[in-house]
Amino acid sequence: MTLKQSKIVKITIALLIISSVFYLLVSIFISSRKQAQAAEGRTIQGNCSVRAIKENGPFSDKIDILFVGISYDSDADVERDARMLLYSPNGFFSEEPFKSYESRFNIWAFNFIGAPDTTMNVQSALATLHTSIIFPQADHKVFMFPKDDFRPFAIPVLNLVYLSFPFMGVFTEDLPRIIVHELGHSIGSIKDEYVEKALGDRPGRPNCARSESQARSWWGSYENQGEGKLKVGYYVGCSYVENNIRPTENSVMNDPYCVLSAPDYDVCDYYGFGIINANKLKEVIESSTK
C-alpha cells in the first residue's frame, strides 16, 4: 500500500466514524422529540394533533377511540371531560366487559377549533362533521359538545358517537352512562332495548329478536342466567317496537339513566349490559385486539 493509499484509508475511516456519531446524535434527537410530542400532542397521519390519554400499544393491536371536543376553551378541558366519561365511578371503564379489557384500548383526545356551526341546523352539521376529522387510526370517534343541546346518538355503521353535555341538564352524573350506552352501539352494534315507535323497527342480533322463538334460538342456552333485572329471559319491547323481544328486563341499552331504588328512593341503580350484550362486546374486543 502506498503512502497516498494509506492516507485515503485513514480519511475514509475517519469519515465513517464521524458519520456514525452524527447518525447516533440524530437518532437520539428524533427519539427525544417523539417523546416530547407524545406528551404535548402529535399529528399521526392526518390533520389531527392528538393527545394520548391512554396508549396501551400499537394501533393495529388495540381499539382506538378518539374523543373530539367541539370548540372547547382548551385541550386540557377536552381531556378532562374525556377522562370523566371514561374513568368516573359509573364511566366506560367501570362497566364490564370494558373494565376487564381496558388494556386493549388506546384513548386519544383532540380539540376541534372552528367546527361547523350547529346553531341553525344541528343534524345537518353533525352529518358531515366526522369528515372534517382525518385520523385513520381511530376505530371509533366520540364528538363531545359542551354547548350545543341535542339528543345524544350513535351511528354504528360509521363508528361515531355524538354527545351533548347540555342535554343532560343538571343530571351530569348520568353522562358517563350515556357514553357506555352509545359505545355499546358503536363497538358491538348492540340494539336499543326500549320502545319509541317514531324511530322505526330495527331488530337484529345480538339482543333484539322478532319473536320469542327467534329469541330462544339466539340466547335460549343462557335462560335464567344473571341476577335481578339482568336475568336472561324473553321480554317484549326492543329496537323501538313492542313486538320485538329483548333478553333482560332492564339494561344500559334500555335505561342508562339513574334508577332510584325503593324504599327510600335516594340510591341510584345503574344496570349493566347483561350476559348477551356483554358476550357480543367480548367477541368484538377479543377478535380485533391483543
Image: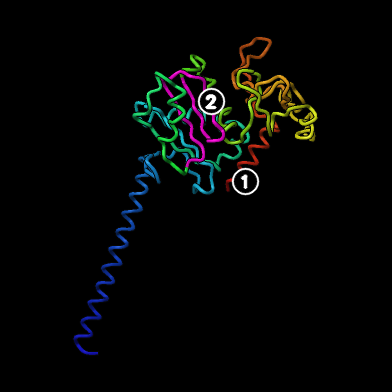
The residue positioned farthest toward the top in the image shown:
264
x, y (%) of residue 36? 34, 45
Callout 1 touching callout 2 (CB < 8 Å): no
Q: Secondary structure at mark 2?
A: strand
Magenta highlight on residue 161: yes
Quarter of the N terminus within the rendering: bottom left
Badge 1 is on which residue?
A: 287
| Residue in front for this viewpoint, 252 or 227 | 252
Residue in the image at 58% along x and 36% along y: 187
Tell me the number on the disc at residue 33: none
Q: Is residue 84 left or right of residue 262?
A: left
Residue nearer the viewer, 244 or 252: 244
Seen as rendered, the residue at the extreme bottom is: 1
Q: In the image, what residue occupies the spot 36% across and 49% down?
A: 34
Q: Residue shown at 59%/19% (left/top)?
A: 257
In the rendered image, residue 213, in percent from the top left (x then y), is placed at 80, 30
Q: Which residues are magenta?
A: 138-165
Q: Say whether residue 290 is left or right of residue 234.
A: left
Q: Is residue 87 above or below residue 3?
A: above
**Residue 35 drawn at (x, y percent):** 37, 47
